[in-house]
Amino acid sequence: MNPTNPSAEWLLVRDGRVAALGLGSPPDAANRVDAGGRLILPGFQDAHIHLLSGGIDIATAAYLYDVSSEDELVAALRAHAASKPDLPIVFGSGWQPGIFGDHNLTAALLDRAVSDRPVLIYDSSFHNACLNSRAVDMAGVQGMADPPNGHILRDAKGRATGMLHEEVIPVVAARLPELTEDDWMAGLLAGQAHANRHGITGVLDACVRKPEVTTYGRAAAAGALTLRVAGTALVTEADTPETAVARLTALRAAYPGPDFHVHSAKFFLDGVYENRTAANLTPYADAKGANAPCMFSLEQTKALMTALDAARFAIHVHVIGDAAVRRAIEGLEAARAANGPWPAQHQLAHLQLVDPADFSRLQGLATANIQSLWARFEPPYTGPSLSMIGKDRWPDVYAFRKMLDAGADWCLSSDWAVSTLNPFEIIETAITRQKRLDNSPLEPFFIDQSLTIEECVQGYTVNAARACWREQYTGMLRVGYSADLIILDRDIFSCPAHDISKTRVLTTLFKGKEVWRAPDW
């Protein structure tokens, strides 16, 4: 991926760095690996992932992504609770909003699974959660008022049903039993091992709070990280420019890197369509209509982004609806007007719906942080959001080609644990705009918005390294750069597009040391 030296036949590693590359016969070395002509690439970097949350899911939570009925949900939680008798709280993650929601997911249903311990289960987007009765009582939810940008669902009698939306979730979770430091470390080890298995040697954790920062810091100090982590620290509606800059400046000083550093500020400017909190410029097109406001006012957005930009933080923004995209652009434009341009690598993540007038405004302002796995027809999951957007706006949904053609910088990412972190399935979908062939795909979702394989690999290597502020020593195989590399079982540049998702990582090296090897390699 080095444009001045695009390919080589051998690579020499010394002291964790690339010492030489070349064509023809390789030099002598004490340890040699014959890749058999296979493709070797720089380690991939995922520039929008919730690595520690996903790892905690692996280590402590019931897997609910494939659950498709109430009985299956109850059975999965009951079995998980029995397998984790020592945990003071039962976690679950991944229930699908296309199957469950306000209409059928309640504390009463979860009580059928577990009633003697608090239960907290997150949906696949992590923007919705549900509690059992024990958790509702323990957290005092019945007497709690809705916080800004958060909502407690209540029945006709005003009683909390157990369902929570958006920013009330962390408020409630803070009142429930906490995981131990050992639980968090076990989650990190599980998460990074899962990432290494899929060829990932660097990440940007897209929302870090105290537990994440503390755990990453401990692991970095102990030399236990097998990938690099950039952290984006949460900024909330309760912040002022002064409080946000002070908090993030302290975190940056405490965790300067290189293996773990806090480099950006995270904004949620809206929610998700699944709970009707995505912010659109026009009312929703489905029968219910209505809309949702942005989670920060325009004045507050400009003030916060200007102050954080002046303090030289990257700004990383969750935007789903076109009103949230517009609000983020206006905030970043105000920051640039006040502070001047600099290589900040501000990022807009998700970009589900973008108004046509705003594609060109991304150029030179913000990187399009793309999760291409969602750019496909996949009922029942995509149905609600597409209905709310309206069919006449579908051409502007996940319109990645329009962004790149308008001059936007880009990187690819997963948003794991919201979806798979497998970069090869994500790359395949970016090219085909369909589900995998073995998963009954429908017609492509606006195939004209496809990316090329070259753009995808660049988005996972060179561009992702730049988004994480580590492009000076990672993202390509170049003399002096870190020896972070992967050996693949096929050439993804030449194989059929629908075979890319079958790609296996045979070996992952981080700083020249093997952190993953396929059992049969």
Image (cartoon, helix red, strand yellow):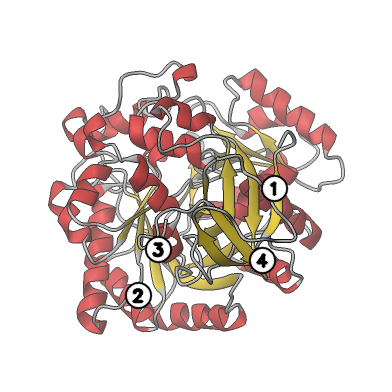
For badge 4, the amino acid type reads Tyr
Q: Tell us which disc is closer to us: 1 or 4.
A: 1
Q: Position of residue 418 (x, y in %)?
A: 52, 42
Q: Is residue 129 left or right of residue 6?
A: right
Q: Secondary structure at mark 1?
A: strand
Give the quarter of the image for residue 238: bottom left
How many numbered marks are there?
Answer: 4
In primary-sequence order, the first of circles 2 and 4 is 4
Residue at which label 1 appears: 516
Position of residue 501 relative to residue 34, above or below, is above
State the SS at label 2: helix
Query: Which circle, 3 or 2, is nearer the viewer?
Result: 3
Q: Earlier in the sequence, mark 3 or mark 1?
A: 3
Residue in the foreground of this view, choosing between 347 and 288: 347
Q: Position of residue 139 (x, y in %)?
A: 67, 52
Q: Looking at the rendering, in which quadrant would you find the C terminus?
A: top right
Q: Which residue is mark 4?
A: 216
- Amino acid carrying label 1: it is Trp
Q: Are marks 2 and 1 in contact (CB under 8 Å)?
A: no
Q: Which mark is residue 304?
A: 2
Provide the residue designation for mark 3: 316
- Classify mark 3: residues with Cα within 10 Å, few (<14), some (14-19) or many (20+): many
CB within 8 Å, label 4 to label 3: no
- Which one is earlier in the sequence, the residue at label 4 or at label 3? 4
Q: Residue at x 23, y 82 (%)?
A: 338
Q: Quadrant of the N terminus?
A: bottom left
Instruction: Work out which residue is located at the far right of the displayed protein and give it.
Output: 86
